[in-house]
């Protein structure tokens, strides 16, 4: 039996609780993508500073550009190399911080944060289009799809839960999935 068939066989209040749990899970997963992207972007920048040869396709394109510019500057004039690298890391952390902010706001059920964050992440993905990095561009598409799924789940939760429900679970109870 599928999850939908199991939920249909339950009493209405239990079926609604199962649906709430399912939508909360999808909502949180979508919102938490912003955190993953931010963290891996900073890791990519640290890898670039320490002249590593690997990196994650999951990071922001803008931080990759900042890192590449810093590497070019450092290779031309090693006198201030450490300062340039620190400035590049600060700029990368700033952009990652914006991503974290959108993740936090999305987790606070701010639908506009999902939408604006997805628009900015789409623009960031276009940077990969310019340099023909298809794998990173494809990942951006996948991450955007996951974020959108979180936004859709948020909309469904708003339709299920009363407008005054401030806690993640309505009425202060934690529904238990059927055994």
Image (cartoon, helix red, strand yellow):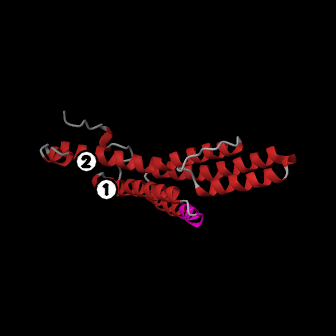
Residue 168: percent from the left, percent from the top? 37, 44
Give the residue at x 76% y 55%: 72
The answer to whether residue 7 is magenta is no
Q: Residue at x 83, y 54 (%)?
A: 76
Quadrant holding the N terminus: top left
Number of dots carrying numbers = 2
Q: Is residue 134 visible?
A: yes
Disc 2 crowd, CA 10 A, few/some/many (<14, 14-19, 20+) = many
Query: Residue 33 at x, y = what percent?
Result: 47, 49
Q: Position of residue 102 (x, y in %)?
A: 52, 53
Report the side of 66 relative to 14 (left or right).
right
Q: Nearer the viewer, residue 22 or 49?
A: 49
**Labels 1 and 2: the sequence-earlier one:** 2
Most distant residue in the top direction: 179
What label does residue 19 carry, if any?
A: 2
Quadrant where the C terminus is found in the figure = top left
Which disc number belongs to residue 121?
Answer: none
- Secondary element at image label 1: helix
> Which sits in the foreground, 41 or 69?
69
Residue at (12, 44) in percent of width and height: 9
Direction from residue 15 to residue 172 in the image, left or right: right
Specify the segment rendered in magenta: 123-131
State if disc 2 and disc 1 touch (CB < 8 Å): yes
Residue 155 drawn at (x, y percent): 35, 58
Q: Residues within 10 Å of mark 1 (few under 14, many from 20)?
A: some
In the rendered image, the vertical position of residue 124 relative to residue 106, given as above or below: below
Foreground: 46 or 9? 46
In the image, residue 73 above or below residue 1: below
- Kindly state the secondary structure of the residue where label 2 is placed: helix
Q: Which residue is mark 1?
A: 156
Is 165 on the left or on the right of 143, as rendered? left
């Amino acid at each position: 039996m599928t999850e939908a068939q199991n939920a249909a066989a339950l009493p209405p209040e239990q079926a609604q609780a199962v649906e709430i749990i399912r939508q909360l899970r999808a909502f949180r997963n979508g919102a938490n993508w912003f955190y993953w992207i931010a963290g891996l972007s900073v890791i990519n920048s640290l890898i670039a500073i320490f002249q590593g040869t690997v990196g994650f396709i999951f990071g922001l394109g803008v931080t990759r550009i900042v890192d590449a510019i810093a590497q070019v500057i450092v290779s031309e004039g090693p006198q201030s190399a450490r300062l340039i690298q620190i400035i590049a890391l600060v700029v990368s952390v700033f952009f990652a911080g914006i991503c974290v902010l959108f993740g936090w706001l999305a987790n606070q059920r701010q639908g506009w944060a999902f939408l604006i964050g997805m628009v900015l992440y789409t623009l960031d993905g276009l940077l990969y289009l310019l340099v023909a990095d298809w794998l990173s561009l494809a990942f951006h598409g996948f991450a955007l799809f996951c974020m959108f799924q979180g936004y859709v789940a948020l909309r469904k939760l708003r339709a299920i839960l009363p407008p005054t429900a401030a806690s993640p679970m309505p009425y202060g109870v934690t529904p238990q999935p059927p055994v």
